[in-house]
Image: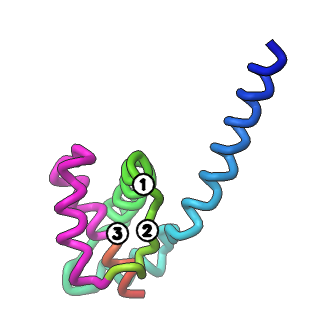
Amino acid sequence: MRRLAILVMGLICLVAFNSCGTTSVVPPVTRELAQKSATGPTRVDLATLREGRTVFVSRCIECHTLPAVSSHSAQEWPRLIDEMAGRANLKPAEREAVLAYILAVHAQ
């Protein structure tokens, strides 16, 4: 029984420490980001950016660690998201929101 309790505590700590590091590469949606996106060529609203970040953080982590947005070019991201959207069972609106969020952060 004691071994099980130690194992459970160890797993909880591992998950807690791991999750802290994964969101550090995912910038928050700020007013500045939303303002730039609302006036940019593809005009994205605050709600879409928030949804995109939420989906990116919650769904992409199911299969792999989150990549830094700067790890790929703005031209590469649409193809990469298309490839992963099927695996992650993303709805078209979720896919578009993730792409909008990533491109908005990448443009900063």
Label 2 packing within 10 angstroms: few (<14), some (14-19), many (20+): some
- Where does residue 80 sit, x and y in percent of width and height? 23, 68
Residue at x-position 45% and y-position 62%:
66
Cβ–Cβ under 8 Å for marks 1 and 2: yes
Q: Is residue 101 above or below residue 59?
A: below
- Where does residue 12 sit, x and y in percent of width and height? 69, 36
- Where does residue 8 sit, x and y in percent of width and height? 71, 27
Query: Which residue type carries mark 3?
Result: Tyr
Q: Nearer the viewer, residue 75 or 49?
A: 75
Residue at x-position 26% and y-position 86%:
40
Residue ID for mark 1: 64
Label 3 packing within 10 angstroms: few (<14), some (14-19), many (20+): many
Query: Element at badge 1?
Result: loop
- Distance from Cα at disc 3 to Cα at disc 1: 19 Å
Residue ID for mark 3: 101
Residue ID for mark 2: 67
Q: Is residue 106 left or right of residue 94?
A: right
Q: Nearer the viewer, mark 2 or mark 3?
A: 2
Query: Which residue type carries mark 1?
Result: His
Q: Nearer the viewer, residue 16 or 32?
A: 16
Q: How many marks?
A: 3
N-terminal label among 2 and 3: 2
Query: Element at badge 2?
Result: loop
